[in-house]
C-alpha cells in the first residue's frame, strides 16, 4: 500500500521516547503535532516503551507488545533516543536497530539543511543522506574466539542485492524530486570489493531495472569513496545533493554533515519502509544533559514534519518546518547546543507561537 494515499479520519501515532533526552524532545514534538489542528487528521497518541531503561526495569529492551501495537494499530511513530551500553550485556540488543528490522524500515532519510549563518551554519548546505537501515555490520553477527595470539573478534558484514536495490531506488526517487537531481553513491569498494562492490554496482544498476523506462535519466550519478566523501563534505559540501550509503557509512556521514549546520540537535530523520514510517531525531540520548530541560527539540519537531510529509500531509509538515526555520533565523530562543540559553520548553513555545 502506498503510505500517502490512505485516507484517514485520524492519525494514530506511536510515541517511543526511550532513553535520555528522548523523554524530553518527543513530548515537545507531540505538542507541535497537536498544534497543527485541522492541517492533519486528528492525532491520537499511543505511549510505548523500549530502550535501555526499559531493559533494566523489565529485562526486555523491545517488548513484543510495542512492536505489535506499532504494526497493528499505528499509522506511524516517533522514536526518541536510546542509550545502549558500549559493552556486551547478556540479553540486551539495541531496540532501535531491532525495530528498524522488525518493521522493515529499510531507508533512513536524513536531510541536512542550513538556514542561518548566525548559528554557526555553513551557507548553502542542502543535502540528504540516505542510509541503508537493515544490514551491513548492523546484522550484529559478532563472535569472539581465542587464537594463537589471544582474543580475536569477528563481525559479519552483510550487503545484499535486494537491500542495495531498494535503498538505491529510494535514493533515485529522492534525487529526482529535487532541483539538482544529483546522486552520490558512497562506498569503499577499492578495499571491500565484494561487499561495497555489490552495493555500488547494484545502486548504479537501478536506472536500468525493467519497467523504469528512463525514469531516472535526469539524475546525474557520481560516486565517492567514504573517506574522501567525508573530506569533501567538509571542504566543499555544496557538491553533494543526495548521498546514498550502506548502513555504517550513512550513520557516520550524517553525524559529520550535522557539524556543517551547527548542531546534531537540528537533524531529523525518518525510518521509512513500504508500509510504515517512524520519525527519529538523529541525535542520541545525550546523558550529559538529560533531565536539565535544555535538550534541543527542533530535530524531533523536524522529524515529525518529515514523517507527516511522507504520509502525504505536506501542509502540516511545511508549517512545522517554516516555524522551525523562523525560530533558527531569529536566533533569540535557542538551546545551548546552538549557543543559546533557552530551555526545551521555551524553544517549543517559540515554535508554537509561529504556527
Ligand atoms: N535517535 C538516535 C539514537 O538514539 N542514536 C543513538 C543510537 O542509535 N544508538 C544505538 C543504540 O543505542 O542502540
Image: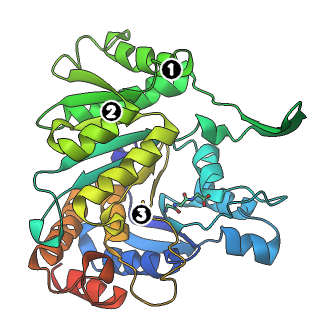
Number of callouts: 3
Residue 70 lies, in percent from the top left, at 59, 59
Instruction: Identify the residue at image location x=10%, y=56%.
Output: 123
Q: SS for tag 3?
A: loop
Estimate the spatial distance between the alpha carbons at disc 1 and disc 2, rounded to whole Å. Answer: 14 Å
3 or 2: tag closer to the N-terminus: 2
Which quadrant would residue 330 be assigned to in this image? bottom left
To which residue does mark 1 refer? 191
Within 10 angstroms of label 3, few (less than 14), some, or many (20 or more) residues? Answer: many
Query: What's the mark number on residue 281?
Result: 3
Within 10 angstroms of label 1, few (less than 14), some, or many (20 or more) residues? Answer: few
Mark 3 vs mark 1, foreground winner is 1
Residue 42 lies, in percent from the top left, at 37, 72
Mark 3 vs mark 2, foreground winner is 2
Residue 261 lies, in percent from the top left, at 23, 60
To which residue does mark 2 refer? 228
Amino acid at each position: 500500500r502506498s503510505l500517502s494515499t490512505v485516507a484517514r479520519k485520524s492519525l494514530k501515532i506511536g510515541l517511543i521516547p526511550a532513553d535520555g533526552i528522548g523523554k524530553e524532545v518527543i513530548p515537545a514534538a507531540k505538542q507541535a503535532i497537536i498544534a497543527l489542528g485541522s492541517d492533519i487528521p486528528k492525532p491520537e497518541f499511543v505511549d510505548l516503551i523500549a530502550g535501555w531503561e526499559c531493559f533494566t526495569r523489565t529485562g526486555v529492551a523491545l517488548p513484543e507488545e510495542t512492536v505489535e501495537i506499532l504494526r497493528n494499530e499505528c499509522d506511524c511513530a516517533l522514536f526518541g533516543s536510546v542509550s545502549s551500553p558500549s559493552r556486551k550485556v547478556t540479553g540486551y540488543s539495541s531496540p532501535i536497530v531491532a525495530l528498524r528490522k522488525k518493521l522493515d524500515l529499510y531507508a533512513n532519510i536524513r536531510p541536512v539543511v542550513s538556514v542561518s549563518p548566525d548559528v554557526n551554519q555553513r551557507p548553502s548546505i542542502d543535502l540528504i543522506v540516505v542510509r541503508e537501515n537493515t544490514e551491513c555490520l548492523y546484522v550484529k553477527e559478532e563472535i569472539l574466539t581465542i587464537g594463537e595470539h589471544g582474543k580475536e573478534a569477528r563481525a559479519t558484514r552483510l550487503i545484499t542485492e535486494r537491500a542495495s536495490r531498494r535503498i538505491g531506488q529510494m535514493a533515485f526517487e529522492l534525487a529526482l524530486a529535487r532541483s539538482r537531481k544529483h546522486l552520490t553513491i558512497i562506498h569503499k569498494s577499492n578495499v571491500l570489493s565484494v561487499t561495497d562492490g555489490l552495493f555500488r554496482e547494484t545502486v548504479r544498476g537501478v536506472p536500468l531495472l525493467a519497467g523504469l523506462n528512463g525514469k531516472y535519466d535526469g539524475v546525474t550519478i557520481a560516486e565517492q569513496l567514504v573517506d574522501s566523501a567525508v573530506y569533501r563534505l567538509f571542504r566543499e559540501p555544496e557538491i553533494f545533493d543526495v548521498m546514498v550509503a550502506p548502513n555504517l557509512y550513512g550513520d557516520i556521514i550524517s553525524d559529520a554533515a550535522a557539524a556543517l549546520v551547527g548542531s546534531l540537535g537540528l537533524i531529523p530523520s525518518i525510518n521509512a519502509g513500504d508500509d510504515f514510517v517512524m520519525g527519529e531525531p538523529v541525535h542520541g540520548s545525550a546523558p550529559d544533559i538529560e533531565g536539565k530541560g535544555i535538550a534541543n527539540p527542533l530535530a524531533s519537531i523536524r522529524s515529525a514534519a518529515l514523517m507527516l510529509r511522507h504520509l502525504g500531509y505536506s501542509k502540516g509538515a511545511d508549517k512545522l518546518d517554516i516555524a522551525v526555520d523562523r525560530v533558527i533565523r531569529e536566533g533569540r530562543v535557542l538551546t545551548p547546543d546552538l549557543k543559546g540559553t533557552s530551555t526545551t520548553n521555551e524553544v517549543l513555545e517559540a515554535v508554537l507561537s509561529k504556527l
